[in-house]
Image (tube, helix red, strand yellow):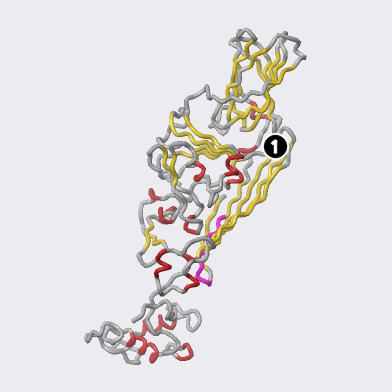
Amino acid sequence: MFGVDFDFGGNNEMKLRTRGSAFLLASFLAMASLSAPHARAQQTLGGITGTVTDASGAVVADATVTLVGDQTKLTRSQNSNSNGGYLFVNLPIGSYTLTITHAGFQSQTIPSILVQANRTASVNAELKVGNVSESITVEETPLLNMVDTTNGYVMDKLEIDSVPLPTGSFTALALLSPGVNAELQSGAGANEGLGNAPVWANGQRDTSNSFLLNGVDARNLFNGKTTSNVSSSRIVNATGVSTSSALSTLPIQSSGSVYLAIGESIPSPPQETIQEVRVNTSMYDAQQGSTSGAHIDMSTASGTNTIHGSAYIHRGTNWLSADPYFYNADPNIPANEKNPSMHRYSAGGTIGLPIKKDKLFLYAGYQHTRASDDQIGIYRPVVPRGLDASNCPGGVRSATCLATVGNINNLSSPDALNLESDSTLNSNIGTAPGNINPIAYTLFNYGCPKNCIIPWSNPIRMPSP
């Protein structure tokens, strides 16, 4: 389950906390029930097929073909058919050892056959005449997909762990596939959300992709978008259209079509929990052809007979970041705020273990992400010039103080526009001309002296007259 909440602290800093916990049981259980040969599933599973022949090339029927999982000891067995063929389906991803025996022939063992999601590996065997008690081990790696025409790219666990991801999002892995582009992250702050990027495949729109997580359709409910960046309207996931004011970097909510909802709704498993990512870009089979863009299939890791796990922490800061251009050019921003503070921490762990050896396994992962970003958290409201202790002694916003400040900012003041049409304020509270409006007086004093709703002016941040 993933949740996002925003917390505006007393220091005007926006904090984004993302919590992810995944007790990934059903998809990671390797049980005896998986051995049912006709239990077809939307493929988080793979398969192995091949033909058994003798040295002359003639097919060998009724050979015993036994398959054993290297990590879980999942065992399947069948006999080759009259054409010498065999087929194992619905195999959890991982490596397997294949053993083929037949009376009058030497046994043959083929170890470390890699099974990938949504692919069927072709492994043919050639038996030699001899005693069945004699065994030959053949090192074979199936390189050619001979079962379907799907074009795509597969990343295994080693490759996934080796790719540096700025926000840990799987979407950055997709661009490693030929014909696929993804938007590079503009940063790692709170505006990046879960760090998901838009993905384009072979010139198709970023709404034309489909996503599977452990065989479950994980597309955005409305239009398939993946981006979670505020500049791509991330905030509309729950509220409608979002835009930004020219005076503020904060999103402004409005009532737009929910069809525009994007970004945060797709599952985003941490990089450390992903076992395999497949990106198919063309020549889809029937189960993948619902969209014209990329078909991205993620498979998370599984428990095995060996207890294994990991712990990790990632940290990103602004210490190598350049000052934002407009921050650097603005003389009203203090030097110590030219480069807004940004801290992003991701910490978590994974564990896989056997519940019942060779039968039942558990895999679980947890990640906590916290982003603290001053660039969108600090706001600089424009307040009346002169609203400070020099005109309001003791921090008291009296009527006299407000009248003085009002006249400093009066349009007829020589320090302002020097217009004759603007009247002078007096220190009376009322509704007559020249009086201080009672509502304005209340607003200026609300929360004062420490937490005034209208802040005190800061000469450093205020434009010069």
Callout 1 amino acid: Thr
Residue 156 on the magenta segment = no
Residue at 56% x, 32% y is 117
Q: Is residue 291 above or below residue 89?
A: below
Left or right for 256, reference 210: left
Q: Is residue 199 above or below residue 382?
A: above
Confirm whether residue 221 shows in the render: no
Q: Which residue is mark 1?
A: 304
Residue 187, percent across and down? Answer: 48, 56
Residue 180, percent across and down? Answer: 44, 39
Residue 15 on the magenta segment = yes
Residue 459, percent across and down? Answer: 42, 81
Quadrant in the picture for residue 290: top left
- The quarter of the picture where the C terminus appears is bottom left
The answer to which of 26 and 330 lies nearer the viewer is: 330
The answer to which of 294 and 337 lies nearer the viewer is: 337
Extent of the magenta region: 10-18
Residue 125, percent across and down? Answer: 64, 16
Left or right for 309, reference 455: right
Q: Residue furthest right?
A: 133
